[in-house]
Image (spheres, rainbow, N blue to C red):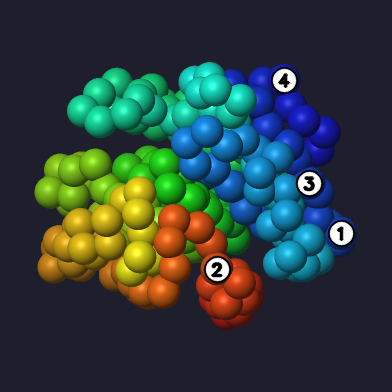
Amino acid sequence: MPNRKDIPLSHIFIPSKVPSKKLMVVLHGRGDSSTGFSFLPPYLDMEEMNYILLDAPYDYYDGFSWYDLPPNQLEGILHSRALLTETLDRLFEEEFNAHESFLFGFSQGSLLTFEFGARYGKVLAGYIAVSGYIYDAERLLEEMNPDVKSSHWLCTHGTYDEVLPYEISKDQVETLQEGGFEIDFRSYDKVHTIAEDELKMFEEWIKSR
């Protein structure tokens, strides 16, 4: 599949090395772009995985953003959720299988992994939310697709995160867990980044699904 004109978000598509309907959708953080995660497919080195690295809809300096800075996040979150719904609906029409696919997000992309992924009508094989937070955990529990609660969710955060405080994100995840949301939450001694040992864990976690 070449880059598609019918998808509302600009993107980089990296095909699998062997024919497959497995897809990983990758959402970058604020100020970054799809190219910022071009390292991920060769690192994970999964021959049967296709990848689509999406660009957020709003310009932000030399990169892009999924939503505005606090306290003005909601409008952008809602707009990005709608665009992601349209994008994944088209991807899962024929080319790829939702139940074999993954959603991966870092920072702002992590927030959308929860705020979009948990509401999306199709259940994916796994969701990976890295170094982000949840806009409204209580509302998410009310509005989420109940079928995703028992899917495979992995959330990681750095105890030294200087951008998004660890304790806030941890408390939000615990609110979801108390609401019956099965989330594997893992802490790392890191700042607002992705650590090397964390990447190795992602590879093992994805392959175990």
Q: Name the residue carrying label 4.
A: 5
Nearer-the-camera pick, 116 or 59: 59
Tell me: residue 165, above or below residue 6.
below
Secondary structure of the residue carrying numbered label 2: loop
The C terminus appears in which quarter of the rendering?
bottom right
- Does residue 104 appear to the left or right of 33 in the view shown? left
Observer able to see residue 113: no
Can you tell which of label 1 and label 3 is closer to the viewer?
3
Q: Quadrant of residue 20?
A: bottom right
Tag shown at residue 14: 3
Name the residue at 74% across, 27% down. Answer: 4
Secondary structure of the residue carrying numbered label 4: loop
Name the residue at 38% across, 28% down. Answer: 67
CA gap, disc 2 and disc 4:
34 Å
Residue type at the position of mark 1: Lys
- Does residue 75 appear to the left or right of 41 in the view shown? left
Mark closest to the chain's N terminus, 3 or 2: 3
User: Local crowd at mark 3 within 10 Å, few (<14), some, or many (≥20)?
Assistant: some
